[in-house]
Image: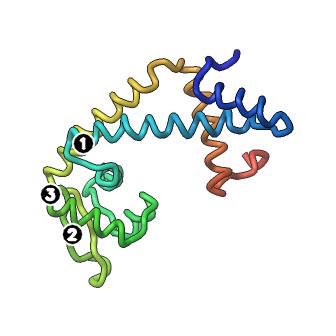
Amino acid sequence: MTAPADRVTQILAEWARERPDLDASPMGVIGRIHRIGLHLTDELTRVYREFGLGEGDFDVLATLRRAGAPFERTPSELAASTMVTTGAMTKRVDRLEGAGLVSRRVSEADGRGRVVQLTAPGLEVIDRAYSRHLENEERLLSGVSEDDRAALARILGHWLADVEGTGRDASLD
């Protein structure tokens, strides 16, 4: 089954005409993923804004929510989970604390450390935002069959593990 014509198809045809000596086929995958990523970011952040959140804010609140009760993590755990620097995390937490969505306190385990915790309003916001986020993701995938979704998840999971260097040799499974 061939992919329907899109902007990347046109770009590939132009490169084939202009540089037939080069194999531009990787662009068929990378170019489409890149363009889809740009569209998805726009669509996802639109939902976050409905709740007064930016993409990073949503990420922090969701990371705290996923931790389970009492919905807390250290700033370094948050930074590692969201893949930002501790300095960037401090700015995010400052903003969320100012909005009353998280609080900071001294760690009971280590008096020098801090813990970031969802507040009751933060829990309410992330639960509503996450529900809306999943509805939005379902809408964005509505044109993709269940079988294709499963295949995409599998393929992209293997590729991401390879790109991030976290993949394992499948023969070990």
Quadrant of the rendered structure where residue 104 is?
Answer: bottom left
Nearer the N terminus, badge 3 or badge 1? 1
Farthest-out residue, right: 21
Q: Mark 1 is on which residue type?
A: Arg
Q: Mark 2 is on which residue type?
A: Arg
Query: What residue is at 22 percent from the left and 57 percent from the top?
Result: 118
Depth-wise, is mark 3 or mark 2 nearer the camera? 3
Q: Mark 3 is on which residue type?
A: Ala
Q: Are marks 3 and 2 in contact (CB under 8 Å)?
A: no
Rendering coords of residue 61 (x, y %): 29, 52
Query: Which is more toward the observer, 55 or 9?
Result: 9
Depth-wise, is mark 3 or mark 1 nearer the camera? 1
The quarter of the rendered structure image containing the N terminus is top right
Mark 2 nearby-residue class (10 Å; few <14, some 14–19, many ≥20) = some
Question: Residue 49 has which mark?
Answer: 1
Q: What distance separates the C-alpha of mark 3 from that of mark 1?
A: 14 Å
For disc 2, the marked residue is 104
Nearer the N terminus, badge 3 or badge 2? 3
23 relative to 139, above or below: below
Query: What residue is at 14 percent from the left and 57 percent from the top?
Result: 99
Question: Residue 99 has which mark?
Answer: 3
